[in-house]
Amino acid sequence: MRRRLGPDPSAAVTEAAHGAWTTFVATGDPGWDAYALDRRTIGLIAEKAVGVPDPNRAERLLWEGVR
């Protein structure tokens, strides 16, 4: 697993993560599209939370068909 935030995430990152989580708990919507196999959108949380479609596509495709 790659660490993306480092040992001390900024207050903005902490607030974005907390905001996405509490919005999801309250409404069922974290602020980005739901994950689906045709889009594979995930939430990337940095200074703000944004939806990113299939961010690790190349790596995922390398493993396709491997069991």
Image: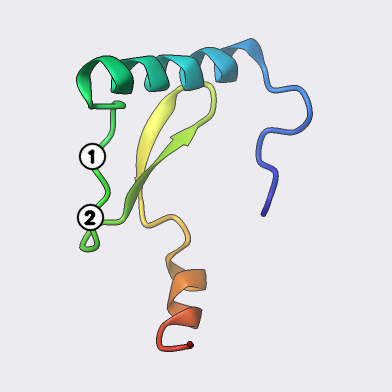
Q: Residues within 10 Å of mark 1 (few under 14, many from 20)?
A: some
Q: Residues within 10 Å of mark 2 (few under 14, many from 20)?
A: few
Kindly identify which residue carries mark 1: 33
Between the residue at mark 2 and the residue at mark 1, the CA separation in whole angstroms equals: 9 Å
Residue at the image position 68 percent from the left and 51 percent from the top: 2
The x and y percentages for residue 45 are: 49, 31
Q: Secondary structure at mark 2?
A: loop
Residue sitting nearer the eye, 34 or 53: 34
Look at the picture and state if 36 lies above or below 48: below
Amino acid carrying mark 2 in the image: Ala
Residue at the image position 42 percent from the left and 27 percent from the top: 49
The x and y percentages for residue 23 are: 31, 16
Q: Judge left or right: residue 43 versus residue 37.
A: right
For residue 36, which numbered disc appears in the image?
A: 2
Residue at the image position 26 percent from the left and 14 percent from the top: 26
The image quadrant that residue 20 belongs to is: top left
Callout 2 touching callout 1 (CB < 8 Å): yes
The image quadrant that residue 34 belongs to is: top left
The x and y percentages for residue 10 are: 67, 17
Look at the picture and state if 30 lies above or below 1: above
Look at the picture and state if 47 lies above or below 6: above
